């Protein structure tokens, strides 16, 4: 991997196949001013356009890859990335078999999920907030990614079953993610065992464990190799303001409008 990646960015510790690289940016390394200091990659949060462009260019130079930033809508659509794919595609996940082209999702509390086939032939990134993760009738963004893996393998006439490895990045932690009963019901409808991921926090309120919910969904898809975020405090975007942006935390700062926080990126690519 390039030695120009900022030392405060996170490099996933997982058994990715040879030739597959990944990174998760933090607040460190960019040029944005308060309250977006410093490595804000979101163009939709009120930051200066020239600062966002400079930060995106910095990421591409540091990783030595091309990136395509999505217009994320908390849904389950997967965008197939080609070298000519422009920024702004309405999707919450992306997948590619091209080299030097980074599948990229932005987060500031939602869960980033990076995935690769065990052969390294395809990589994908998913933006998994609770809506996208839950989906409809049990079909959310992770299930959509797996359908895309299957479709691409079929197009390439792959004969063997696809095996996938996943890495979960930082997100709002289980001690900070308060949700209503409708969120709990949405997950239990598809997986009754998801009840274990919710702790009562008052009448009609629960603390939800987002990475654990993602692990349940991935396990149901047959993924046994799941690495990264295990729900500990070190992974919580809300609890680590010096390192991570947090939509929920920073929206509560006096003088901040809702949504005035930066965005981090999770990227995965093939050499």
Image (cartoon, grey):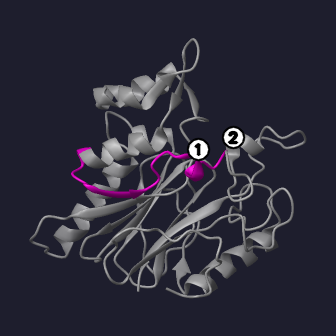
Say which residue appears at 55% left-offset and 48% top-offset: 110
Q: Where's residue 70, x and y in %?
A: 55, 62
Relative side of 260 to 201, left or right: right
Mark positioned earlier in the residue sequence (2 or 1): 1
* Secondary structure of residue under mark 1: loop
In which quarter of the view is residue 216 placed? top left
Residue placed furthest toward the left: 159
> Who is closer to the viewer here, 266 or 56?
266
* Magenta stretch encompasses residue 225: yes
Relative side of 174 to 249, left or right: left
Residue at image mark 2? 248
In which quarter of the view is residue 187 placed? top left
Q: Where's residue 55, x and y in %?
A: 72, 74
> Who is closer to the viewer here, 170 or 266?
170
* Magenta stretch encompasses residue 107: no
The magenta segment is 220-238
Q: Where's residue 245, x and y in %?
A: 70, 54
Residue at image mark 1? 172
In which quarter of the view is residue 119 placed? bottom left
Relative side of 177 to 115, left or right: right
Q: In 3D space, how far apart are the residues under numbered discs 2 and 1 (Cα atoms)?
A: 8 Å
């Amino acid at each position: 991997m390039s030695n120009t990646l900022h030392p405060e960015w996170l490099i996933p510790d997982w058994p990715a196949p040879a030739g597959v690289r990944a990174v998760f940016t933090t607040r460190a390394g960019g040029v944005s001013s308060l309250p977006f200091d410093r490595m804000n990659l979101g163009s939709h949060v009120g930051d200066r356009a020239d600062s966002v462009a400079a930060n995106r260019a910095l990421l591409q130079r540091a990783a030595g890859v091309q990136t395509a930033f999505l217009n994320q809508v908390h849904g389950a659509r997967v965008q197939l990335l080609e070298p000519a794919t422009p920024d702004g595609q309405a999707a919450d996940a992306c997948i590619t078999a091209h080299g030097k082209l980074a599948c990229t999702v932005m987060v500031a509390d939602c869960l980033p999920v990076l995935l690769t086939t065990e052969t390294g032939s395809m990589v994908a990134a998913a933006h998994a907030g609770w809506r996208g993760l839950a989906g409809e009738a049990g079909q959310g963004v992770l299930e959509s990614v797996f359908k895309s893996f299957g479709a691409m393998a079929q197009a390439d006439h792959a004969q063997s079953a696809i095996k996938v490895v996943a890495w979960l990045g930082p997100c709002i932690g289980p001690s900070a993610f308060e949700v209503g009963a409708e969120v709990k019901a949405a997950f239990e409808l598809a997986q009754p065992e998801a009840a274990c991921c919710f702790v009562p926090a008052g009448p009609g309120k629960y603390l939800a464990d987002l990475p654990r919910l993602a692990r349940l969904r991935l396990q149901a898809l047959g993924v046994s190799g799941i690495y990264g975020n295990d729900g500990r405090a070190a992974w919580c975007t809300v609890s680590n303001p010096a390192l991570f942006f947090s939509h929920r935390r920073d929206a509560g700062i006096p003088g901040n409008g809702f949504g005035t926080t930066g965005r981090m990126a999770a990227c995965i690519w093939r050499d």
